[in-house]
Image: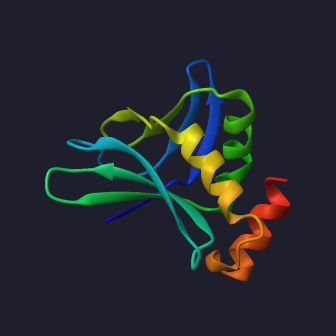
Amino acid sequence: MKIYVHAAERQERGWMMTCDASLQGVQPRQHMLVDSDECAFIYILEAEDAFVYVVMPKNVWGALKEVLATKEPVLLVGSDATIALDGIHEEMAYLIENIKGNANYGDEMEQAVTAFFA
């Protein structure tokens, strides 16, 4: 299952990433992936019987860049709950470094990440 983050806003408690999905029964997995086809970062949540992929497209990369610079908490705000995206700072930093100059992620993703997070 995929959940799409449609907005990100800095608030007093940290960065609020909003989505329209239910977050009941999911826990942060503290692991991230990349979706080169959608040119997006993916944070993995764990449900009882499945993984839930939180898709962070280019329209929230500005917030992700700020998150990396400030190390502020990141919270995913759903229709019925809010959960902390634990480990996002380390995972994002690792992915960005790994993607730069690495054609295995596809040319579009590699170029976009290198240009944006340089």
Q: Where 49 sits versus 88, above or below?
A: below
Tell me if 26 is positioned left or right of 93 in this view.
left
Q: Position of residue 64 (x, y in %)?
A: 66, 45
Q: Where 54 sits versus 28, above or below?
A: below
Residue drawn at point x = 21 percent, y = 50 percent: 47
Residue drawn at point x = 73 percent, y = 81 percent: 107
90 or 3: nearer the viewer: 90
Whether residue 79 can be seen here? no
Tell me if 113 is positioned left or right of 60 in this view.
right
Residue drawn at point x = 62 percent, y = 26 percent: 72
Residue drawn at point x = 58 percent, y = 74 percent: 38
Image quadrant holding the N terminus, namely bottom left
Q: Position of residue 51 (x, y in %)?
A: 28, 58
Q: Position of residue 23 (x, y in %)?
A: 30, 44
Q: Where 81 sits versus 56, above or below?
A: above
65 or 91: nearer the viewer: 91
Residue closest to the far top: 12
33 or 38: nearer the viewer: 33
97 or 20: nearer the viewer: 97
Residue closest to the far left: 49
Q: Quadrant of residue 84?
A: top left
Whether residue 76 can be seen here? yes
Q: Position of residue 45 (x, y in %)?
A: 34, 49
